Amino acid sequence: MQLSSTDSHRLEKSQRPVSCSKTLIPMDSSDGFRPLDGKSLGEYIKKTPALVAQLGNQVDDLTIKEVGDGNLNFVYIVTGPAGSFVVKQALPYVRCVGESWPMTKERAYFEALALKGQGHLCPDHVPEVYHFDRPMSLIAMRYLKPPHIILRKGLIAGIEYPLLAQHMAEYMSRTLFFTSLLYRSTTEHRRAVAEFCGNVGLCRLTEQVVFSDPYKVAQYNHWTSPYLDHDAEAIREDDVLKIEVAGLKSMFCERAQALIHGDLHTSSVMVTIDSTQVIDPEFAFYGPMGFDIGAFLGNLILAYFAQDGHADEGNDRKAYKQWVLGTIEETWNLFQKKFICLWDEHKDGNGDAYPASIYNKPELQRLVQQKYMTELFHDSLGFGAAKMIRRIVGIAHVEDFEAIADAGKRAFCERGALDCGKLLLKERHQFRTISQVISAIQEVRPC
Ligand code: ADP
Ligand code: SR1
Ligand code: MG
């Protein structure tokens, strides 16, 4: 990842990530933390009964491979003759930047908590946690074996996943509904919100890199220069866009609507043709539901705009673009349907948002549901759009575009996504259905 920016010299000191001195962050600390490598992880495993058991008690011939390709953590695949798992360890900094950007390793605690909670609510689509060591910021979980791959890579390769929309709608509707006040009492909700308020470091990271940095000159911003220089500048000078994104940032910080994954892009989903598994919820906290739905849909929209860059003589990607659009539409429609079904099923339960004693007439129930879903639709479009924009002019870009070697072609694809993101962010309240959104996407770049 290239982190230089033509504007970096104009960065104010206060805008930079907190930096530590050249002497490295102390790693072997009195709190029981030790960063592991392949060798020391092998020794750790042998001393940890839960992991020994997971390997069928055969620990003499282990293969340990570091495969972390994400932005933050270290991930090891551990295989033995009679078992396997994945180990993920958080070090006290942002991996893709280095030790100059410290980041709490407590993020592993929130990831483990979210994986367990979301796994309980949706076991078919979340890997099981086998072991969590808080002092070591270390999680061991089910190894999602090949042919599982990261969804983003599948989208770049042009692979269709017929069950993806259904599975993601299931995951999002269950994890969001059951952690909201539609299902829970305020007593339960407040306790859970308080616990996840501790994930402040990662929330602040999102606040910075999604809602702030793309709209100003910032150290790590970069884009396909010189092609998108004017586009990046236009974003920094677009007052309407800035007003809209400020509203979304406030909602992100203020609205504890449900336990959200917090980073639900297409590299946080592993897939085969018939399996969909959501990993990496280290950004989890009680926030607006639309942030998750928008992250997923926004990343599918990015995949759509990247397809022209992956087209070749053998495959113009036209049919695949249609499949991506169909998946966006189906995901929202199925999500909405499943979410309303859960609401109907539990309307007489303990949920404190719409008590049955007040919302007791079917027509009133329909009205509040319609209002709720319309607001959620617009929130999702707004957050999705913000996530699209940050992936083109912010710090962390996506492989969908980075894999397009020809810079001119890449910029053309990115500009389509940027124009679409700006349109959705500014005009989201005009859209009533997802099919109108699909038409708007196609107007930017036809299939
Ligand atoms: P980060 O928090 O740094 O983004 P991720 O959780 O996204 O890390 O994991 C990085 C990579 O490790 C993923 O892209 C995937 O290839 C691999 N990975 C993570 N969890 C699993 C798992 N349970 N099974 C198989 N591979 C995994
Ligand atoms: C330093 S920004 C790194 C990004 O990677 C994670 O997956 C999140 O999306 C975060 O914003
Ligand atoms: Mg990740």
Image (spheres, rainbow, N blue to C red):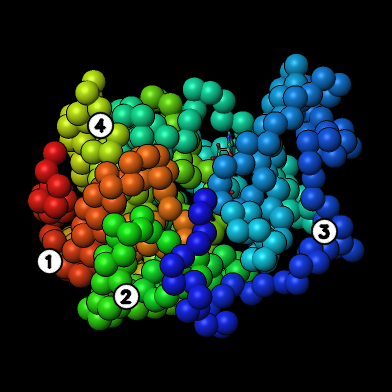
The tag on residue 311 is: 4
Where residue 171 appears, as percent x and y from the top left, is: 41, 44
Where residue 49 appears, as percent x and y from the top left, is: 84, 35
Tell us which disc is closer to us: 1 or 3. 3
Instruction: Tell me the residue at 57%/42% (across/down).
Output: 69
Q: Are marks 1 and 2 in contact (CB under 8 Å)?
A: no
Query: Is residue 128 positioned above or below 25 on the image?
Result: above
State the separation of the CA atoms marked 1 and 4: 32 Å
To which residue does mark 3 refer?
A: 27
The tag on residue 338 is: none
To which residue does mark 2 refer?
A: 236
Q: Is mark 4 within 8 Å of ligand 1?
A: no
Q: Which amino acid does label 3 sit on?
A: Met
- Sooner in the amino-acid sequence: mark 1 or mark 2: 2
To which residue does mark 1 refer?
A: 430
Tell us which disc is closer to us: 1 or 2. 2
Residue 149 or 314: which is nearer the viewer?
314
State the separation of the CA atoms marked 4 and 3: 46 Å
* Element assignment for label 3: loop
* Element assignment for label 4: loop
